[in-house]
Amino acid sequence: MDGLGELDERISHCRACPRLVDWREEVARTKRAAFADQTYWGRPVPGFGPHDASLLIIGLAPAAHGGNRTGRMFTGDRSGDVLFRALYDIGLASRPDAVGADDGLTLYGVRVTAPVHCAPPANKPTPAERDTCRPWLVQELNLLRPTLRAVVVLGAFGWQAALPAFAAAGWPVPRPRPVFAHGARADLDGLGLYGCYHVSQRNTFTGRLTPEMLRTTLSTAARAAGLQVAPNGAADQERTDESS
C-alpha cells in the first residue's frame, strides 16, 4: 500500500469529532427509505482518484445519503451526478455518473477530496470540525505534491478551509488571502487555484451554476494541470463512434 492508500485507510477510521461520529452512524442505522435494503458505509470518506493526479477537486463534505452511504466521494447523490457528468463530458471520467463504489468509475488525472471527511448535520460542519479535519487534507496535499499542478475548490467553505491547508503544506498563499468567487484564480508558486460554485442542488437547480459554467472551470484547470481535455460534448461523440 502506498502513501495515499495508507492515508485513505487511516482517514476511514477517524473518530476525532464526536458530533460527526454520532451523526454519520445514526444516519447509517436509520437510513433513507429508498436505501433501506443497503448497508451504509457510515464512516469518514477518503479521497477518490489516482494517486498521481495533477488536478485536485476539493468539495465540502460527504452527503449523508451519498458518500456516507456508498463510501466514495460524491457518489450516490445529485451533486456527484453533476460533477462526474461534467468530468465525463470533458474526457476525464470513464462514465457520466457514480452510483456505488463498485460501479467501475475511473478518473483520469483527477482526484476528488474534501476538507471534512464525515457527513455533517444539515451539511454544515462547524469551524472546529473543519480545523480538526485539516491535517488529513494537509497530508493529502503533501503526498500529491510531486504531480499536483492545479486545484478546483467548490464553494466558499472549501475555499476557506483549503487556503490554510495549502499554507501548512508549504505552498505560499498570497496576502491578503484570495477571496472566493466563481471564476476566482490564484497562483500558489506554480500551483493554479480555481474557484467554482459548489455543485449543490441549490446552485444547480436554480441555475446559479450551469453545466457549461462547471465544464468551463474544470476544463481551464485541467489544461493548466497538463491534462488533455475534450471539447464540450466531444467525449460523448467519441464514445458513440466507438460503440457503433
Image (cartoon, rainbow, N blue to C red):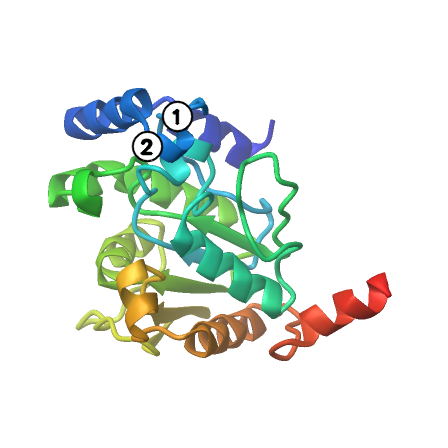
The outermost residue toward the front is 33
Q: Are marks 1 and 2 in contact (CB under 8 Å)?
A: yes
Residue at 57% in and 74% down: 223
Give how far across and how far down residue 59 sits, in percent. Answer: 35, 54
Q: Nearer the viewer, residue 173 or 197?
A: 197
Give how far across and how far down residue 40 sits, in percent. Answer: 40, 25
Q: Does 67 sit above or below residue 194? A: above
Residue at 27% in and 59% down: 163
Residue at 65% in and 66% down: 91
Circle 2 residue? 32
Residue at 36% in and 26% down: 43
Name the side, left or right, on which 178 lies relative to 209.
left
Q: Looking at numbered disc 2 in the image, what kind of residue is underneath it?
A: Arg
Circle 1 residue? 36
Q: CA distance from mark 1 to mark 2?
A: 6 Å
Q: What SS does tag 1 mark? A: loop
Name the side, left or right, on which 241 lies relative to 68.
right
Q: What SS does tag 2 mark? A: loop
For disc 1, the neighbor class at 10 Å (few under 14, some 14 to 19, many from 20) is few
Q: Nearer the viewer, residue 167 or 95?
A: 95
- The image quadrant that residue 214 belongs to is bottom left
Q: Is residue 56 visible?
A: no
